[in-house]
Structure formats: C-alpha cells, structure tokens
Amino acid sequence: MTADHVRTTIGPKVHGTWNLHESLPKDLDFFVMLSSLAGVMGHRGKGNYGCGNIFQDYFAAFRRSQGLRAMTIDIGYLLGAMGLKVMHKSDLHGLMATALEGSDAHPPQVMCGLPYNEQDDPWYWIYDQRFAALRKTAAGSGVGGSAAVSLRDELVRCGQMGDEAVHLITSALAQRLAKLMMMPEDDMDTGKPLSSYDVDSLVAVEVRNWIAKEAMVEVSVFDVMSNIPMRQLAAELAAKRKILA
C-alpha cells in the first residue's frame, strides 16, 4: 500500500469531519458520524480504511472533551446490504434514533454487529488479547447445540468417490457462502460463481481458508473470485483432492 493510497482513503474522512467541526455551530443538538467496525477489529488488506474510521472514533471523544455533542456509530455489515454477520438495518435505525437524542449519557463511540460467538469458525481477530473479554463472554453464554458433521469428516468418509465428493463440496460451499453473506441457503444458486453474490476480498479470504481447512486443498483468492459456477469450483476441488491423495 502506497502513501497515496493511504492519503486518498483517509483524507475525505479526516478533512471532511474537521471541516464540519469548524464550520457548524457549536451548539448543535447532535453530531453523528457513521464509522465502521473495520477500525475496531481491523480489515485485512484495507488498513487505510480502518485508520479513517479510527480517526472518527477518537474525534468523537475529542469533541466530547470540548463539551460538544458527538457520537460515532461503528457499524458492521448490514443484512440486506451485502452483510456478513449479525446486524440488521433496524439495528442501525435504532442506534441513529439514540444518537440523535444528543445525550451525553451515551458513550461517544457505539459498536454494533461485532460477532463474537462463532464457535465453529471464529474470526481471525478474536484471538487478539484486546478481545479477551469477548471470548470470555462467548464461553459463558451457554450457546450450545449438537455439533454438525464437518465437510472434512464427510470427505474422509466418502474417500475418493468423485460424484459424491463433488456433491458434498458444492453443498457445503453454498452453505458456507450463505452463512458469510447472511442469506438464506435457498437463495444460493450453485450454477452461479461466488463473485455474483458481491463477495469482497475479506469474504474471499474467509472462503479460501475454509476450503483449506475443510476440503484439505490449497486455492488462491483469485480461484475463489473467478467467474466459474460454484459446482464447477467444487469439481475442481474434488479433482485436486484426488490428485493429492
């Protein structure tokens, strides 16, 4: 990442926020900034984007220290707007209503949509010591239920049976994508490529890591993002497994 990439991304947030701070009256009823959880949990490959959001979080605290109204809302991905996880649009609307109250009783930074109880596939950032409290909360939350049979176990069971392996990988890949994109599994069309579901680089990395773990083959992010149907990708993964066996 070049210095220009950093400046181009951070500049609008920094200068735009500061210009509003300088130009608007000091006796505002509210000053609300929409930020992102990327500044809290990090964003692989987009550190510049995370930095811009961190600036807004700290700027809200700065305004509060000056006796002025301010709040940032760090939002996750929205269900119905290419979402990854737990946040709905109604959550954001409720937070906006609270922020517009302008009350200093609310903290200057509010986070929503931070997933922490993914027991089967925890997010990469959850092992950071700064999130130890969230891990402890998740461990004591009592989230239970019977453990699902993993794709890896199913592939080991069926051995190198080509058609069955392709079917298992296709089905599991569609389920995994539906979970990541917070979409109903019935909406997944295995005749379409993953890229047709607005898969971004972060989701592609998660899918690649899941494939390595469950299908036990190595693929690149470019393979995941390629314009081939899911069932064809599954067939190629099954073929790689057979070669490696």
Image (cartoon, grey):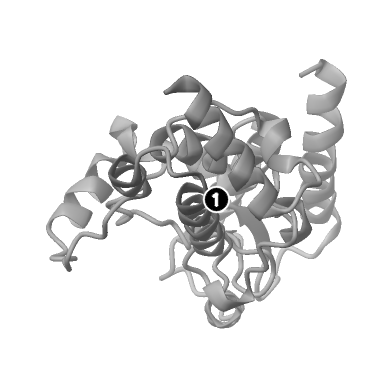
Q: Quadrant of the C terminus?
A: top left
Tell me the element at label 1: loop
Q: Nearer the viewer, residue 25 or 228?
A: 228
**Is 160 above or below relative to 198?**
above
Residue 184 visible from this viewpoint = no
Image coords of residue 33 (percent x, y)? 67, 60
Residue 165 visible from this viewpoint = yes
**Is 76 above or below relative to 236?**
below
Image coords of residue 93 (percent x, y)? 60, 81
Q: Residues within 10 Å of mark 1 (few under 14, many from 20)?
A: many
Residue holding disc 1: 37
Q: Residue at 46% of width from left, 54% of height from top?
A: 168
Image coords of residue 225 (percent x, y)? 73, 41
Q: Nearer the viewer, residue 146 or 170?
A: 170
Residue occupying the far top of the picture: 2
Q: Residue at 54% of width from left, 50% of height from top?
A: 37
Image coords of residue 150 (percent x, y)? 31, 50
Q: Nearer the viewer, residue 58 or 76?
A: 76
Count how many numbered circles sit on residues in the image. 1
Q: Quadrant of the N terminus?
A: top right
Q: Does residue 111 appear left or right of residue 45 in this picture?
A: left
Give the image quarter of residue 20.
Answer: bottom right
Q: Residue at 81% of width from left, 16% of height from top?
A: 2
Q: Does residue 28 appear left or right of residue 111 in this picture?
A: right
Residue type at mark 1: give it: Leu
